[in-house]
Image: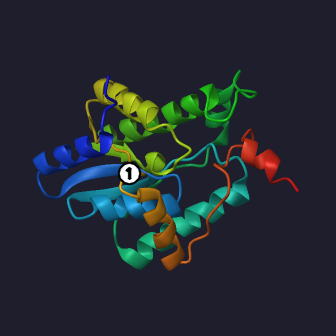
Amino acid sequence: MNKPDYNKMMKEQAAGAADGEKLLLHSCCGPCSTRCLEALKEKFAVTVFYYNPNITDPAEYEKRKGEQLRLLRETGWADFLDCDYAPEEFFDAAKGFEEAREGGARCYECYRLRLERTARTAKEYGFAWFCSTLSVSPHKNAAWLNRLGEEMQGKYGVKWLYNDFKKENGYLRSVRLAEAHKLYRQNYCGCVFSDWTKKNDG
């Protein structure tokens, strides 16, 4: 069975949408958002939604949020919608999965937490569409993200924009755009349970 081509599906959906429809883009960080915004901004009226309770260190959270805001100020590519910093919501979602392998069940629950909040917020604020920057990373499972997006579309009645932003050298493009804007690039997802945290402890 052929795997779904989520990048192609996104292009087909965008072609069928009216110009300027409101889209809520969950963003994990400024660097990852660069390529996604570049791909979306000409078609949609994008608002970046910064909901990342998985970033369990407050200083790291504020640093990443500051870089996201700086990118948007410099480019004007999207509006910004913030939310309260609530790492306890991530810890609740990760409960029982603390020792799960990187890219496994804990990550799936983290995806679910953030996509559900995005879909619920999109409905609350009257957005026509929602999606996430997460698929731009080669470390993130695009099939999981799109299945969860479908699920939240059914639950909240807001259209999920299929995506796999790493396609067409999307990740490389995000790196180059981040370099051009001199954005801080973190070396782990933000989660205290991340393998990257342990590898970078010294």
Q: Is 73 above or below relative to 137? A: below
Report whether 126 appears left or right of 191: left
Is 42 left or right of 33, judged from the image as shown?
left
Give the number of callouts: 1
Q: Position of residue 103 (x, y in %)?
A: 61, 34
Q: Residues within 10 Å of mark 1 (few under 14, many from 20)?
A: some
Give the amino acid at mark 1: Lys
The residue lying furthest to the front in this view is 1
Q: Residue at x 69, y 43 (%)?
A: 191
Q: Residue placed at 77% from the left, 48% from the top?
A: 197
Residue 47 image offset from top left, x and y in percent = 35, 57
- 3 relative to 70 in the view: left or right: left
Q: Secondary structure at mark 1?
A: loop
The x, y position of residue 14, in whole percent, is: 19, 49
On the question of residue 127 being in view, the answer is no
Residue 136 vertical placement versus 186 (above, below) = above
Q: Which quarter of the picture shows residue 43?
A: bottom left
What residue sits 36% from the left and 29% below the top?
152
Q: Quadrant of residue 156?
A: top left
158 sits to left or right of 152: left
Q: Is residue 92 visible?
A: yes
State the residue in front, 169 or 54. Answer: 169
Model colouring: rainbow
- For the residue pair 167 and 36, the one nearer the viewer reads as 167
Closer to us: 178 or 28 = 178
92 up-or-down from 171: above or below? above
**Percent of width and height locating residue 29:** 53, 58
State the quadrant of the C terminus.
bottom right
Identify residue for label 1.
167
- Looking at the figure, which quarter contains the N terminus? top left
Residue sitting at the far right: 202
Seen from the viewer's position, the closer of residues 120 and 200 is 200
